Amino acid sequence: MARLSLEEGHAADAETVIRKCKEQFHQDGQADDELAASVTLMEGLLDEGKPVEAAKEEQASRALAAKSTNQLNRLQFDLVSARVELAIGHMAAARPKLQRTLDSARAHLLLGIELETRLTLAELKRKLRTGSRGARRSRRIGKTCARQGIRPDRRQIPVGPHNDEKKSM
């Protein structure tokens, strides 16, 4: 329900629901679900233009992410963590996080995470140098997403072990 609110552009409405879910997951000892809720909350905060709050949530969730045995959840956390760094202007901190996330996504054949990470790297490059090369790269990655049936909007990339086919990249 909260993810749907985010996708429809109602991030403020979703924030309350996500926080309640996150607390319930914490009380129930469902660490993976709590981490997934934190990732969704950080995405929503970024969408609302609240990078400082997203950074606070990222800081509070680091230990949870470090303990997670769910590779997909950890990569999603790492990706949104790098996006938080980008949003608060810490470009130098974002780059190595994104590269590690990209390498791990490739190693685990998680195409959705890989493409989303590549898009975020292109965004970083575009911010670092406002040339047209970054824009061309973003368009090229977007076309790759489209060919794979994945919308390049981070909230609409299917999650799960669906990426078991070999990549042509």
Image: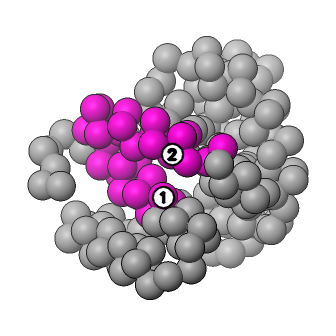
Residue to which mark 1 is pinned: 121
Residue 43: in magenta span: no
Q: Secondary structure at mark 1?
A: helix
User: Which of the 4 image quadrants contains residue 128?
Assistant: bottom right
Q: Amino acid at mark 1?
A: Leu
Q: Identify the image quadrant of residue 145.
A: bottom left
Q: Nearer the viewer, residue 86 or 132?
A: 132
The residue sitting at 36% across, 37% down in the picture is: 103
Q: Which mark is residue 138?
A: none
Residue tagged 2: 98
| Kind of residue indicated by mark 2 | Leu
Residue 154 visible here: no
Q: Main secondary structure of the magenta part?
A: helix
- Residue 6 image point, x, y percent: 66, 65
Range of the magenta residues? Answer: 93-121
Q: Point out residue 93 in the picture as x, y percentages from the top left corner.
A: 66, 44
| Image location (x, y in percent) of residue 49 | 80, 68
Q: Is residue 81 above or below residue 31?
A: below
- Report the Cα–Cα distance between label 2 and label 1: 7 Å
Residue 97 in the magenta stretch? The answer is yes
Mark 2: which secondary structure? helix
Residues tagged 2 and 1 counted as in contact (Cβ below 8 A): yes
